[in-house]
Each structure stands twice: as C-alpha cells, then as structure tokens.
Image: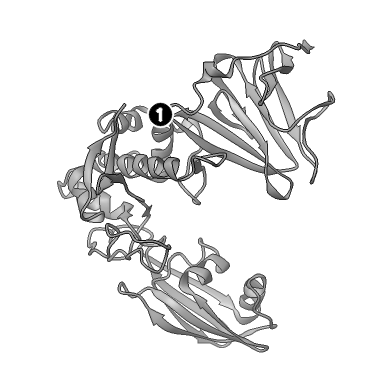
Amino acid sequence: MIFFLASTLSLDSFAWGSEGTIRVCIARRTGALAVQGRDLALYDLPTGRLLWKIQRKGSLVLKREKGSPLFLEGPKVTARSFLVTAAGGTLEVQGRRHYSPLKVFPGPNGEIWAINELPMENYLAGLVNCEVPLLWPMEALKAQVVAARTYATYQKGNRSGELFDVDSTVADQVYEGMEKEDDRAHQAVRETAGEILVYNGNPIFSVYHACCGGRTEPAEGFWAGEYPYLKSVPCSLCLDSPHFLWNYQISKENFAKTLLPVGLWGSQILDIAISQRTESKRVAKLIIQSDKERMVLSGKEFRQAMGYDFIRSTHFIVKRENGTFFFSGLGWGHGIGLCQWGARGMAEAGENYPSILRHYYPGTQLRRKSP
C-alpha cells in the first residue's frame, strides 16, 4: 500500500557527519536510479518531510532530466535532494545491498548521485574484498585495511565541504556494498581498529596499486604537492602477480580513433616515441605522430586516454610492426605507494603489517585515531 504523509523525520537519528562514519558515492547514474527495500520511505532531505512510503517490499525509481530537479517515477514528487530509508537497515541500489539510509543529489550533466553514509569499519570490511583476495595472508589484509582507512581519513578531511568523502570506484577506493563483508575482512578491520598512518602527525595520502613491477614510483610529477613518504622503493616480491607482465596491441587506425578524444587528429598513427622516463623507468613523456599532426602527452595522460585495462601501467616499451603497435609492460596501476602483490609477498615471507606499511610508506608512523 502506498501513501503520503506530511510528517517530518529527525535526521539527527542517523548521526550524519559523526567521526565514525564515511560518506561514499555509490552510484552516479544518468537518467534513473533504482532502489529496492522493505518499507521504503522517501523524504525531502533539507526539511525531513515525508513525501512517499510503501508498506511492503518494493522499489522506487528516481529520475532526472538535464536541468530539472529530481523526481520520483510515477507519483508527481519532486525535490532538490532526497533521503531514502528502508526497514531492517538495508536497501538495494542498482541491485547491490547497502546500508540504509541513502542521500540522493543532482549531479553535473544530468547525473543522479547516490551517497551512502555508513560506519567507517563497515565500509572497510566491505572494501577489502574488492581490493584484494580475502584468501591472502592476514598480515597483507591488515596492511590493506590500514592503507584504506588512512586514505579515507585523509579524503574525509580534504573533502569536508563536498557532497561525499570517497567515490566507490578506482577514482578512490573500490567499494561494492555490504555483501562483500565476511569474517576475515571483519577480523582484519577489528585487529587494526582505528589505526592510520601519519607523517608529522597528519594522516597521509596513502595511495596504493595492484602491482608495481619491481619498483614503486615517487609521487612527484604525478600529483601536485609534496608527499615525502611516497618515494620510490624496491619491491622484489610481486613477481608472482598475474599482472607483473602485460602485453597489448592496436592497429594504427584504431590507435588514432582512441586518441581522437584527447585532440589528436588523423586517420592513423605513424609513430610513437618515448622522450622521457622517471626514476623507476616509467614513461614520463611521449611524442605521438599521426598523419595529420604531432602531440606530446605525459605517461599519465596517455594511459588515461588509452584505457587503464589496456595500458596497465606507464612502465612499458612499444614497437611498431606492419601497421600494428605492440606494447609490453610491467605491473598494473600508477605504481605509487603500497604494492598490493608486494604486500602479499612480504606477508608470505613472514613480515607483519607494520613492517609492510613502513616499507611502502617510509618515514610514516602507525597511530590509533582518537574516538
């Protein structure tokens, strides 16, 4: 049964913005956002006024047209932002189970943003299985949890004036909801409760990646700012990674089509030359020649344009044969900070999580956050 009430919800009951929570952008949809749950209720977020409710397991679809406010499909209910709740403390967003409640905002370019605010420790327990296999040694899992908690804490302070603290994709940290939580994940979170990495007393920008290919990369030149704890360090224990070596090939015509969005005109790529490498031998700058023009790109820009799943790192060489370009490289990711497969190797060699973290973030200290 669906009904409408002009009542008001106390938003204080959800402890928005408390120290123990993290705001995660779990969906950025264009056009429509689907939510399912039991006893779903839709509120106007700024006022807490109840707009719509269903007393059974059901669903709702929130929509937005470019330049228009959010609206509920079916009944004529509109708002600048919504709060969605469900009985039992859980709901599904685009088919994935998340904690209730959910904030929904209009985003840029007609998008709909779904923001889930949940306890930090639940977020970490759901995150770890998205980032590394839970069958890895516990010390590697603990290192991953501390790095993720530190990153979330850093971004939480950095983005306090924004709608969310972290994105649920590789733009920040991968998080796919509460169904990813399990006993080993909770153990890793519990046994590192509240621990973060600090440098000069402040949480660090604790980035990480899948596999460095033998040596990590310093942060200088990749991100603006100074990160003295993100240095290049040797890593000999990620050799067992299935991502240690990679290959990719592309025709000169498809190469040109791929680079068209970054402004390189031409029907085919004639040549590519690496003009500068970094301390860890990654591509810092390269020159690309099409049949129409010449372009200089950084390694970071080139990898982003080509696709992270194809050019898996900037640690590569390239050659051309008969109109096809062949790339061969090492590692997967930007190569900065903790190497996840290296952490696994160190844990299998008997190292504990504090020593793993000290290796990849030199000069940092492990501290417990204040409650």
What residue is at 34 percent from the left and 61 percent from the top?
226
The picture places residue 203, in percent across and down from the top left corner, at: 32, 45
How packed is label 1: few (under 14 Cα within 10 Å), some, or many (20 or more)? Answer: few
Residue tagged 1: 19
Q: Element under label 1?
A: loop
Rendered image quadrant of residue 135: top left
Task: Give the farthest residue toward the left.
Answer: 350
**Is 42 situated above or below 96?**
above
**In this picture, residue 365 sits left or right of residue 262:** left
Residue at (55%, 64%) from the top-left corner?
A: 307
> Residue 122 at x, y = what percent?
42, 29
Q: Is residue 294 left or right of residue 18?
A: right
Residue at 55% x, 14% y is 88
Quarter of the rendering containing residue 292 = bottom right
Does 139 sit left or right of 294 as displayed?
Answer: left
The colour mode here is: one colour
Q: Position of residue 54 (x, y in %)?
A: 72, 14
Q: Quadrant of the C terminus?
A: top left
Screen quadrant of the N terminus: top right
Is residue 16 or residue 74 the one in the foreground? Answer: 16
Q: Is residue 55 above or below residue 299?
A: above
| Count of all numbered marks drawn on residues in the image | 1
Look at the picture and state if 103 lies above or below 327: above
Question: Quadrant of residue 266 in the image?
Answer: bottom right
Could you say where residue 273 lies in the image, as x and y percent from the top left? 48, 86
Under mark 1, the amino acid is: Glu
